[in-house]
Amino acid sequence: MKFFLDTCSINEIKKWSNFNLVDGVTTNPSLLSKEKKETTQQLKEICSIVKGPVSAQVTKTTNEEMIKQALKFIKISKNIIIKLPANEEGFLAAKFLKKKKIKLNITVGFNASQIIPFGKINVDYFSLILGKTEDWGFSNEETIKTTKKILINIKSKTKLLLASIRNEDHLTKSIINGADVLTVPPTTWEKVLNNKYSNLALEAMHSDWKSISEKDKKKYEG
Ligand code: E4P
């Protein structure tokens, strides 16, 4: 199972690489807009420090324009994966680019049915969005299993990528329900590695440790 980092921050990529949590990176226009550098330059820098796939999302809206943008992106680095929208124009662009053997990630999928046309042409990844649905008052948890089952039943080679992983629950539910790949924002890994209850338990132990004599502590701690 692969874990991509959902970010455009060089610092975050460097930090989480130390934790073996950067098998690849997914970018999007919102994430790029948060960085200070010129966007193409930022993408180039990301590709230069990431060994695995880097998803670059098209911003154009017609299939012809998406194809043009995709062909420009693939010149940046050989680890670029083109991120296309899960709509009609995105499908037409996907069909064309797939024939050219360009790697594709279809994004912002919310309903399991959306995977059918893209799964039929075996795009590399289909991004099913989890956390964002909760902003709008519904859960997409059940959709994970259905989407995975559809891929199996239509005998597709497409990998199910779970995105918008905002918390620990999203992370674990995605894995147990059939995700092939997860793209996780740095903020979620912060939560995992700074668990509130683990910290409380450790604080209590450190507080008890204060009653030990300095001489004894020195011997124990070296
Ligand atoms: C997916 O394609 C998006 O890049 C991303 O995962 C969305 O995450 P968010 O809903 O937390 O912004």
Image (tube, rainbow, N blue to C red):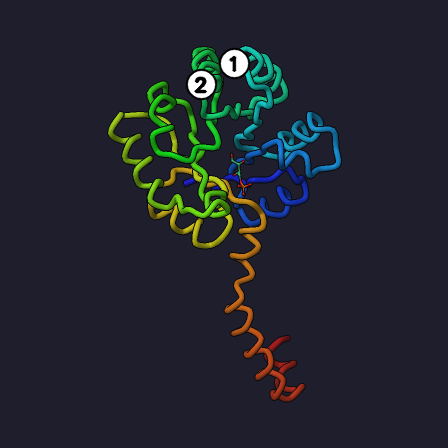
Mark 1 and mark 2 in contact (Cβ < 8 Å)?
no
Q: Quadrant of residue 217?
A: bottom right
Label 1: few (<14), some (14–19) or many (≥20) C-alpha neighbours in 10 Å: some
Name the residue beneath numbered marker 1.
63
Q: Which residue is drawn at 49% across and 25% down?
A: 85
Residue type indicated by callout 2: Glu
| SS under mark 1 | helix
Q: In this view, does 72 lie above or below 50?
A: above
Q: Residue at x 33, y 35 (%)?
A: 147
- Residue furthest to the front: 137
Q: Mark 2 falls on what kind of element?
A: helix
Quadrant containing the N terminus in the rendered view: top left
Tell me which residue sits at (35%, 24%) in the image.
119
Q: Position of residue 10 (x, y in %)?
A: 67, 39
**How far across and how far down the image is residue 170, in percent?**
44, 49
Asked if residue 80 is positioned above or below residue 213 in the image, the reply reads above
Looking at the picture, how far across and down is residue 27, in whole percent? 58, 33
**Quadrant containing the C terminus in the rendered view:** bottom right
Q: Residue at x 64, y 89 (%)?
A: 213
Residue 127 picture quarter: top left
User: What residue did someone put label 2 on?
Assistant: 88
Left or right of residue 70, residue 118 in this image: left
Residue 22 lies, in percent from the top left, at 54, 41
10 Å crowding of disc 2: few (<14), some (14-19), many (20+): few
The kind of residue tagged 1 is Asn
Task: Pick whichever, 58 or 175, lies toward us.
Answer: 58
**Lower sequence index among marks 2 and 1:** 1
Q: Does the residue labelled 1 lie within 8 Å of ligand 1?
A: no
Judge left or right: residue 42 versus residue 162. right
Left or right side of 145 for 14:
right
